[in-house]
Image: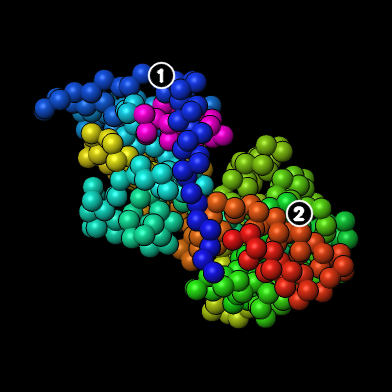
Amino acid sequence: MKKKRLIAAGLTMVMLGSLVLTGCGGGNSSESADSGGGDESVNIVWAGWSGEEEASKPIFERMMDTYREETGNDVTWVGFTWDDAAQQLLIRAQSGEQLDISQADISIFNTLAQADVLADWTDIVGEEYLQNFEESYLEVGRIDGKQLGLPWTMAALTMVYNPEILSAAGWDEPPTTIAEFEQCMADIKAYDPEIIPYALSTKDTTCGADFVPWLWTNGGQIWDEEGNVTLNEEAGVKTLDWYKDMLDKGYITMDVGRSEARQMFAQGKVAFYDDAVVAKSQVISNGVDPDEVVNVCSAMLRPVVNEGDDPQAVQWGGMLVIYKNSEYKEEAAELAKVLNSEEVALDYFENGGMPPVTKEVAQSDVVKNDPYINTFIESTATARLEETARMTNANEIKDIMTEEIQYALLGQKTAQQALDDAASRIEAAE
């Protein structure tokens, strides 16, 4: 069976209706930027949401100043909240109002790509420039052979851990195999029964989402290459049985989602959990000195079944996109190159926490010697796009998985029964 793909037609109708009611403007600029002609400089429009954050505004101003200095062109930033970004970008792209380049996270990217408003980066910058990025980064922005998204703030959703807790339990380094991981959780439980060894998500959509990289670790998938549901095959049952075993031993607990895991981890009540590069910001906001954060919050590769296996991680992050209707695609591409240049990328890394995505800058000493970010970058090299990422009913699928996982964890169904039921429900939802 074929998976349901993201269809933007209905969303487009709603957004165009919104255009009639609210007008085309949004964010910081309600009018199209002035543009030059001929050999004169032009003014491109760059849109997104990250530049609206107070901590990021000075960084974004420096980004734009660098572009102005290097190209002689101007750039106007148009900002939205993240919640409004998909709608406002699509409205602007389809209304004729100037929009040359924007940021887009994976979910917003899918909406824009299916609306057919994006240009192919290969046509603009060429294959040679794209070789600056890891293939796994490029794959996130590639649809039907077209490179519609260019990597910008990519990272992986992997695991973080508290080195102080592990050290107290007798571990100087994080575990690398599942067998070691199980022993480490047992040692943590013996050291302090009040600490949750692993704050695995066991509720809301994050439960279904976090099940997937462990499923991959055991060699399984939600669907096979032909689109048949395989979640309930041997690898899935093995993974869910392992979940139940961890719960029975007190290594994980029920009623934990990403937000609860972050909060408990920041308070020193959790040894391991799954998160993105933003994990340390929660710890810092809880009063930890930024210079000392790696003592209580470090990243690790997901444990594997056998030494030498690829650690599994879900691709996370954002891209840059250029719009088909832009008259200044080349100038917008120059901005993208500036944003991914060493000077600007390292500024964003050091002051905004976002790891650089080009191979060269990612290998710079500043990045390689950073004790926190390095593992996130390493995880991204073998990370995969989450299997439901291109689907319009992604949350429905993950909710189904969460509900059936919970039935198994609570002993109301066997792992096989739960995943058989999940498979049937997923097939019906497609």
Q: Is residue 89 magenta?
A: yes
Q: Which residue is mark 2?
A: 203
Would residue 263 be found to the left or right of residue 98 on screen?
right
Residue at position x 30%, y 22% from top?
Answer: 33
Query: Does the rendering let one see residue 204?
Result: yes
Q: How is the image coloured?
A: rainbow
Q: Quadrant of residue 259?
A: top right
The disc, 1 or 2, on the residue closer to the chain's N-terminal end is 1
For the magenta stretch, what is the residue range?
A: 78-95
Label at residue 348: none
Would residue 2 be found to the left or right of residue 178 on screen?
left
**In front here: 67 or 234?**
234
Q: Residue placed farthest to the left in the image?
A: 39
Q: CA distance from mark 1 to mark 2?
A: 41 Å
Query: Does the rendering let one see residue 169?
Result: no
Q: Are marks 1 and 2 in contact (CB under 8 Å)?
A: no
